[in-house]
């Protein structure tokens, strides 16, 4: 996932835009993981994890974005996709050997607070997201990001579902992206997830961007 938007309040709302290579296999939301009963998310079929996980019973969600920094050793590296699953299931900060993971940003949201854990390959930094609307991108809470500059004011004032209808673009400030690489592969926004958490319940809306744009 490359963009996460969070709005605190009632409801607590998260919208995640997943950017990935178009040929990487995946499947839509479901309870795909018996070891994490009740947790819902889309599943990456290559590594088995997810980019945004929801635990409706706990009124909790966790989202994972790739970060910048020092990469893990190839011989011991494991997928970051399990981090969101474990966080949504237990609500706990990452506590395993993080040197086995490439850099990441992990957001854990529940009705009490929204926490951001950023790992750059050397150290883990924890913070709480402020009240209001925030955008997390691959560089973290980065007000200088072209995407944040272009879209944060719009997410504060406009209907979120309208913003994801933008045409895919290779512009650095685009929210919905599509890059055709020299080797023929395509890196693009593949799906959007919107989660709303309240004491009364949880809603989860999933938009498959490939369904309309690839026929």
Image (cartoon, rainbow, N blue to C red):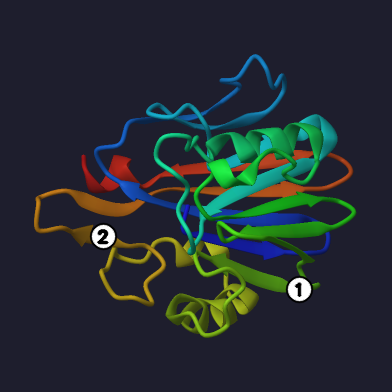
Q: Tell me if I can see residue 55 in this picture.
A: no
Q: Image point 75% across, 41% down: which residue?
A: 95
Left-right relation of 137 to 11: left
Asked whether disc 1 touches disc 2, contact meaning CB atoms under 8 Å apart, the reply is no
Left-right relation of 45 to 136: left
- The secondary structure type at the circle numbered 1 is loop
Q: Image point 66% across, 71% down: which residue?
A: 134
Q: Image point 58% across, 73% down: which residue?
A: 155
- The secondary structure type at the circle numbered 2 is strand
Q: Which residue is mark 1?
A: 132
User: Picture coordinates of residue 128 (x, y %)?
Assistant: 80, 65
Left-right relation of 16 to 14: left
The residue lying toward the viewer, choosing from 104 and 189, is 104
- Decide: is 14 above or below 96: below
Q: Which residue is mark 2?
A: 178
Specify few, some or many for label 1: CA neighbours under 10 Å numbering under 14, 14-19, or 20 or more.
few
Please identify the quarter of the rendering in which residue 101 is found.
top right
**Real-space CA distance between mark 1 and mark 2, rounded to the nearest whole angstrom:** 29 Å
Q: Image point 40% across, 26% down: which residue?
A: 45
Q: Residue furthest top?
A: 34
């Amino acid at each position: 996932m490359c963009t996460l938007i969070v709005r605190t309040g009632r409801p607590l709302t998260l919208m995640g835009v997943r950017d990935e290579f178009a040929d990487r296999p995946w499947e839509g939301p479901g309870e795909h993981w018996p070891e994490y009963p009740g947790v819902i998310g889309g599943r990456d079929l290559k590594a088995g994890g997810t980019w945004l996980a929801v635990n409706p019973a706990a009124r909790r969600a966790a989202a994972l974005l790739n970060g910048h920094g020092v990469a893990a050793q190839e011989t011991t590296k494991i997928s970051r996709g399990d981090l969101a699953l474990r966080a949504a299931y237990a609500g706990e900060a990452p506590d395993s050997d993080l040197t086995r993971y490439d850099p990441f940003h992990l957001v854990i949201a529940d009705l009490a607070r929204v926490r951001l854990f950023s790992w750059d390959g050397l150290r883990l930094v924890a913070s709480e997201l402020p009240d209001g609307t925030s955008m997390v991108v691959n560089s973290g809470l980065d007000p200088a990001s072209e995407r944040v500059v272009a879209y944060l004011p719009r997410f504060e004032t406009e209907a979120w579902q309208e913003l994801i209808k933008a045409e895919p673009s290779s512009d650095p400030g685009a929210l919905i992206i599509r890059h055709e690489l020299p080797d023929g592969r395509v890196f693009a926004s593949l799906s959007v997830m919107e989660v709303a958490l309240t004491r009364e319940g949880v809603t989860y809306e999933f938009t498959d961007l490939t369904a309309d744009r690839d026929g």
